[in-house]
Every structure is written in structure tokens, then in C-alpha cells.
Image (spheres, grey):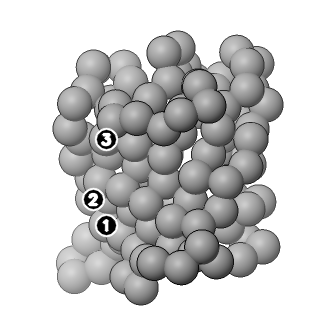
Amino acid sequence: MDAKNINDFDVETKTGSLRVRVMYLENGLIILLSDSSEFRLGNTAVSIPEGRGRNEPASTTLFSKAMDSTLARTLAERISSWTEKSCILVVSVKDFDRASTMGVMRALKQHLQQE
């Protein structure tokens, strides 16, 4: 993976600044979200785009708590829908709430549409 396939940027949300890393793979995306300067493992959602008899993306989570799991899955599914690619989303944010999710969703949609 070349450096040109990795983008880092910050997103300001109502709860503070989040660091985002987007890694573009041939067949999908890996997106890391962090509330610190370092990326780490956390709530992980995996989503595949609609197709093969499904009219919406399918997703699952790992290392998750109930509410964080739903928000991460929703975000991963939206990304798969926008890009028509599989998405692995790792959220290592202490207070990942609905407001944070919406802020990240807007920023990611704008970023991914530019690519």
C-alpha cells in the first residue's frame, strides 16, 4: 500500500476533534476513527455493499458495546452504500454518540466524494 492510498484528516464534532484515517484498497476501504493522536483497536464494524439478492448493505461488529455497535454499523453501511465497496470501520472513540456519528458521516461523505 502506497502513501497515496492513505488519507488522514481531522473532523470537528460536538464532542470534540476526531482523527480519521482512510485506507483505499483495491476492493474496499479501511477507516480508522480515533479521539487521540494515535490510532488503536476498538469497536469494529464490517459492511459489504448491497447485491446478490440484498437491497441494502449487510454488516456485523467485533469488539463492541451495544450502542456503539449500532452507530458503527450504521456508519459502515452508509460508507458501503456510497462507495459500493466493502468497508472495515474501527472506532476507538470514548464517547461515540449520535452527534459524533452524524459529524463523521458528513465529513466522510464529503471526503469520499472528492476521491
The answer to whether residue 57 shows anywhere in this view is no
Alpha-carbon distance for marks 2 and 1?
5 Å
Q: Tag 3, which secondary structure?
A: strand
Is residue 51 among what the camera can see? yes
Label 2 close to label 1 by CB (< 8 Å): yes
Residue position marked by numbered label 3 in the rendering: 44
**Residue 1 drawn at (x, y percent):** 45, 78
* Residue at the (78%, 73%) spot, across then down: 114
Q: Which mark is residue 58?
A: 2
Name above or below for residue 46 compared with residue 54.
above
Q: Secondary structure at mark 2?
A: strand
Could you tell me which residue is drawn at 22 percent across and 30 percent down?
A: 63
Residue type, mark 2 in image: Ala
Label of residue 72 in the image? none
Q: Residue 89: where, in percent of width, then height? A: 41, 49
Compared to 9, does 29 lie above or below? below
| 45 and 92: which is toward the camera | 92
Vertical relation: 10 (above or below) 94:
below
Observer-nearest of 39 and 32: 39
| Quadrant that contains the C terminus | bottom right
Q: Quadrant of residue 105?
A: top right
Q: Residues within 10 Å of mark 1 (few under 14, many from 20)?
A: many
Q: CA distance from mark 1 to mark 3?
A: 14 Å
Q: Along the line of sight, which residue is nearer the eye, 55 or 94?
A: 94
Amino acid identity at mark 3: Thr
Residue tagged 1: 48
Position of residue 105 in the picture relative to residue 34 (left or right): right
Mark with earlier residue (2, 1): 1
- Which of the two marks, 1 or 3, is nearer to us in this view? 3
Element type at marker 1?
strand
Q: Percent position (x, y) of residue 46?
A: 29, 54
Relative to 99, say whether 89 is above or below. below
